[in-house]
Amino acid sequence: MRILVTGGAGYIGSHTVRHLLANGHEVTVFDSLEYGHRQAVPAESLVVGNLRDIDHLDQLLVVNRIEAVVHFAAFAYVGESVTNPAKYYTNNLIYSLQLLDRCRRNGIQKFVFSSTCATYGVPDRVPITEEAPQAPVNPYGHTKLAFEHALSDYASAYPFGFCALRYFNAAGAAADGSIGEDHTPETHLIPLVFQAATGKIPHVTVLGTDYPTPDGTCVRDYVHVDDLATAHALALDKIAPGSKLAYNVGLGRGYSVREVIAAVEAVTGLKVPVKEGPRRAGDPPVLVANADKIRRELGWSAKYDSLRAILDTAWRWHQSHPNGFGE
Ligand SMILES: NC(=O)c1ccc[n+]([C@@H]2O[C@H](COP(=O)([O-])OP(=O)(O)OC[C@H]3O[C@@H](n4cnc5c(N)ncnc54)[C@H](O)[C@@H]3O)[C@@H](O)[C@H]2O)c1
Ligand SMILES: O=c1ccn([C@@H]2O[C@H](COP(=O)(O)OP(=O)(O)O[C@H]3O[C@H](CO)[C@@H](O)[C@H](O)[C@H]3O)[C@@H](O)[C@H]2O)c(=O)[nH]1
């Protein structure tokens, strides 16, 4: 297939691009490089551009005869979305709607969207199934849910199908350590714990120790980026006109912040300096996927089925790239 991957130079995007290319697809990566990295994707696949330049994008859809779009490009700092919602509604919703409509006008019938477990807000039951109420608790989650609604309406009205993949917490790096997670600023737990272990930052702060969880810290479902990548390829095969697919992607097992820190200490053999701090606004206590539906319907399974296996790959990346992509 000829596939356009927006945000393909970012963390999850770059791992997915690698997987799609290995499977023989023709891939055009479209990324502004605001948060992505040129080195994360093959030079010949990359087009540097911004979703806001819709005519540039439209031209690519036509000239490269694109058949499917995988849409990662978005801003993803939950805290920033609260203080600057305009930035999030503009990039994640307005520009995404523009892209969606150009897909329709150009007859593109397959669309895979990076959604998130943040669309569930604070779930009343875990593990979370796809039927759980979607009630985001921050603007980031609102933008993602609003776009899911637009996709659904398009699939009802036009010859168009989509799959929304609701990722839980992406983690890990390519098995060979050649690409991995490098966000600036970094707010995600796992890379921060590695940075604290290796002395790049003085300590990691446990954000909240009074949650209603076994050890008082938040529980998350960490899923390897390469396993997210395979989910995209399976989704592309499944989508047909009229498809309205939505899948949770996680392992179905939760780890607390303290368990993550202990696991990084075990993987690295290093002591992680830790401080305890207050809760971060908007963090649900427990987010764990019920991922039975994607296993059943797409035949998806996780190659990395334990936190230890995921962290081994992240550690290889941090050792071989102590300064990330080094820009
Ligand atoms: N990381 C996670 O745990 C997680 C979980 C759930 C959902 N998601 C979603 O998955 C997607 C990818 O996440 P990630 O962690 O790889 O983020 P990322 O920031 O590494 O990747 C996003 C990429 O999109 C690009 N981009 C953003 N706005 C753009 C625009 N207007 N035009 C062109 N390019 C643009 C950025 O430069 C970046 O390379 C995002 O949509 C995010 O919301 C991530
Ligand atoms: O310095 C830190 C950073 C995080 N945490 C905690 O660690 C957990 C994981 O946090 P983080 O790695 O920031 O991931 P999430 O906040 O769970 O959010 C990520 O995962 C969401 C889906 O779960 C995506 O939608 C978001 O884009 C992505 O940032 C949370 O409980 C945080 O409170 C800490 O204790 N200390």
Image: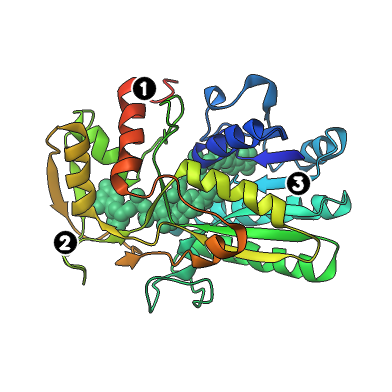
Give amino acid for label 3.
Ala
Which of the two residues, 154 or 277, is positioned nearer the viewer here?
154
Q: Is residue 8 above or below residue 294?
A: above
Which residue is under mark 1?
321
Which of the two residues, 177 or 272, is positioned nearer the viewer here?
177
Alpha carbon distance from label 3 to label 2: 44 Å
Give amino acid for label 1.
His
Q: Is residue 16 left or right of residue 117?
A: right
Q: Is residue 213 above or below residue 86?
A: below
Which residue is under mark 3?
68
Dot placed on the residue nearer the N-terminal end, 3 or 1: 3
Viewport quadrant of the N terminus: top right
Which residue is under mark 2?
209
Dot placed on the residue nearer the N-terminal end, 3 or 2: 3
- Can residue 78 be seen in this snapshot? no
Give amino acid for label 2.
Thr
